[in-house]
Image (tube, rainbow, N blue to C red):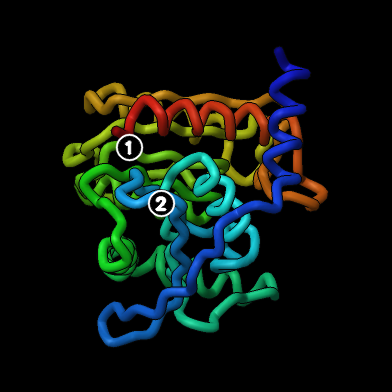
Amino acid sequence: MKTIMTLLFAVVLASSSYAAGVKVDYQVDNQAYEGYYISNTKGAPLVLLVHDWDGLTDYEVKRAGMLAELGYAVFAADLFGKGVRPTEMVDKRQHTGALYKDRAKLRALLQGALDAAKEQGGDVTNAVSMGYCFGGAAVLEQVRSGTDLKGFATFHGGLSTPEGQDYSQAKGKLLIMHGSADSNISLQDFADLATELEQQGVSHEMITYSGAPHAFTVFGSERYRQDADAKSWQRFVEFLAATLN
């Protein structure tokens, strides 16, 4: 089974038949942002895809294409601003840090991305939000804000709950996928979130992958772990099929 899943995943990655997506200019609080929208099927269920601390890059476009091939409409959000795609560590920390300090702005940007997706024809009533690393932390911010979506999924995302926040307003199901070898986000963080979600009655599934460090899904990086990537992607695809109409 493992070998079959790995081969199927390799075929998906090798596919070059993705429909052409479009860059989408939109504004949030009079600031310019540039997202990406792709859909092969009219009326398809929507996936809101939230980028990591590199900003919206070819990585998110690749993942969006993979989802479009499976029959989903995808809007890749931009949380940094049009043309802002940091490459230096200091800049990545500055942009993510600014949003971590201004949670109201982060929530507004996430809602703005959903609004932009709706303008492109995305069905926000039949939608799941998902994110990588920083994007995973942003998705959990959506959950705590009470955003009314059917589901939320994170890949190696930040898991800690800011002081003064909780999951009492959570809607939809949660899927949390984490690397057991992640030195940035500990297994204690993982356990603490599981305890919190259970105490507050939030429907959730949480999975760890052995040997997987932080950012284990990033193609071509030294942290990439093909086994954990394939398994987490397969579980996410199953989650989408079970959650969306």
At x 62%, y 76%, the residue is 86
Please determine whether, in this image, residue 244 is positioned above or below residue 80. Answer: above
Measured as percent of width and height from the top left, residue 97 is found at: 48, 68
Question: Can I make out residue 35 in this image?
Answer: yes
Q: Give the distance between the C-alpha atoms of the residues marked 1 and 2, in whole angstroms.
A: 15 Å
Instruction: Tell me which corner region of the image, top left, top right, bottom left or bottom right, holds residue 30.
Output: bottom left
Relative side of 55 to 32, left or right: right
Within 10 Å of disc 2 (Cα), the crowding (few <14, some 14-19, many 20+) is many
Relative side of 108 to 59, left or right: left
Amino acid type at circle 1 is Gly
Question: Quick one: SS at disc 2?
Answer: strand
Question: Quick one: SS at disc 1?
Answer: strand
How many numbered marks, from 0 up? 2
Residue on which the image places disc 1:
151
Please determine whether, in this image, residue 76 is positioned above or below residue 5. Answer: below
Measured as percent of width and height from the top left, residue 57 is found at: 61, 67
The quadrant of the image that shows the N terminus is: top right
At x 54%, y 80%, the residue is 84
The quadrant of the image that shows the C terminus is: top left
Amino acid type at circle 2 is Ala
Measured as percent of width and height from the top left, residue 98 is found at: 44, 72
Residue on which the image places disc 2:
73
Question: Can I make out residue 139 in this image?
Answer: no
Please determine whether, in this image, residue 197 is positioned above or below residue 220. Answer: above
At x 31%, y 28%, the residue is 197
N-terminal of the pair, mark 1 or mark 2, is 2
At x 45%, y 76%, the residue is 34
- Contact (Cβ within 8 Å) of mark 1 with mark 2: no
Please determine whether, in this image, residue 91 is positioned above or below residue 245. Answer: below
Within 10 Å of disc 1 (Cα), the crowding (few <14, some 14-19, many 20+) is many
Measured as percent of width and height from the top left, residue 165 is found at: 25, 48
Q: Nearer the viewer, mark 1 or mark 2?
A: 2
